[in-house]
């Protein structure tokens, strides 16, 4: 190999190391890294809505057990990556997690009659911080998958019940990393995709779908996604090997046989295609591919 070719080769290797490996697989814990879990509190999930914090039940938190399992796995993964073991600095169980959530509501003084997005932030070396944010009422969290396809019209209700989201295709691939597979506060790849693709015409009902360097569908910036398989009309969602988030709503829909996993080439995604968007805050809503990022 000539000196010029060797220098170009080494420069390419260093570029890959700096732009991908060091960024996506850091050797030390980034200062701003927190494990993230967002859970829907909803008084309508129990027969009797809680009137005080001592009446809150685990079932008032949508998919509570799935959140616990995913958070445990995520914490252990990053503990192993950065410290070489799975011994967390604090005890994390379903019961103490639930007690944290109830305590957050008790101390906040917020009305328990409204639904909330409960944002839970974990640092590997300390306990969690809980934030409570209002979120819209949803009469049926599964309506997006249970209702028939919607007509192509703008004359639809103003919020999620029977409303189709505008979905755009990103213009650049997203590299697979632990920060796509697990939910953390390292989210620049999602912010960049949203900045490239979303026009802001319907801020509460826009999403961008991401694809990996193999040109396979991954996920949305705030949702997992599914498309209809043309051969039989079955809803299919990308496999975890695509780099998509191991979302709790995704897990629930697969477990209940609403979805199947499959490798989905972006060649299958067309303008006008109907998609499903889902996460554990808004449940399942319908979307339609309306454009591509320039």
Image (cartoon, rainbow, N blue to C red):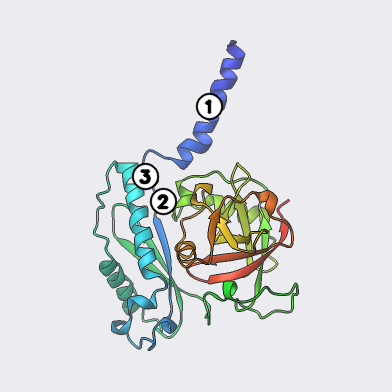
Q: Quadrant of residue 248?
A: bottom left
Q: Is residue 18 above or below residue 282?
A: above
Q: CA distance from mark 1 to mark 3?
A: 23 Å
Q: Could you tell me residue 39's position as x and y percent? A: 42, 69
Q: Quadrant of the N terminus?
A: top right
Q: Earlier in the sequence, mark 2 or mark 1?
A: 1
Q: Secondary structure at mark 1?
A: helix
Q: Is residue 50 above or below residue 128?
A: below
Q: Could you tell me residue 81's position as x and y percent? A: 35, 43
| Residue topped by disc 1 | 13
| Residue topped by disc 2 | 32
Disc number for residue 29: 3
Q: What residue is drawn where x is 45% and y is 62%?
A: 251
Q: Secondary structure at mark 2?
A: loop
Viewer-closest of 278 and 4: 278
Check disc 3: other Cα within 10 Å, few if <14, some if 14-19, many if 20+. Answer: some
Q: Nearer the viewer, mark 1 or mark 3?
A: 1
């Amino acid at each position: 190999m000539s000196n010029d070719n060797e220098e170009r080769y080494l420069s390419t290797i260093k570029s890959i190391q700096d732009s991908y490996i060091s960024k996506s697989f850091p050797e030390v814990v980034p200062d701003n890294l927190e494990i993230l879990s967002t859970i829907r509190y909803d008084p309508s999930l129990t027969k009797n809505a809680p009137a005080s914090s001592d009446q809150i039940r685990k079932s008032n938190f949508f998919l509570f057990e799935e959140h616990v399992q995913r958070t445990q796995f995520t914490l252990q993964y990053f503990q192993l990556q950065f410290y070489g073991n799975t011994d967390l600095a604090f005890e994390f169980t379903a019961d103490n997690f639930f007690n944290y959530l109830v305590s957050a509501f008790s101390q906040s003084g917020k009305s328990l009659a409204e639904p909330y997005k409960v944002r839970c932030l974990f640092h590997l070396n300390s306990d969690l911080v809980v934030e409570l944010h209002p979120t819209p009422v949803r009469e049926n969290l599964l309506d997006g998958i249970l209702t028939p396809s919607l007509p192509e019209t703008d004359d639809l209700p103003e919020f999620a019940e029977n409303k189709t989201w505008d979905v755009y295709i990103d213009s650049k691939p997203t590299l697979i990393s632990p920060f796509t597979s697990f939910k953390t506060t390292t989210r620049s790849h999602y912010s960049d995709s949203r900045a490239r693709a979303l026009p802001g015409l319907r801020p509460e009902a826009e999403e961008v779908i991401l694809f990996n360097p193999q040109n396979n569908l991954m996920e949305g910036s705030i949702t997992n996604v599914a498309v209809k398989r043309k051969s039989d009309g079955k809803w299919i969602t990308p496999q975890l090997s695509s780099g998509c988030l191991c979302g709790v709503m995704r897990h629930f829909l697969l477990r209940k046989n609403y979805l199947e996993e499959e490798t989905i080439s972006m060649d299958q995604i067309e303008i006008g295609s109907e998609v499903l968007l889902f996460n554990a805050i808004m449940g399942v809503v319908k979307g339609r591919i309306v454009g591509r990022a320039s």
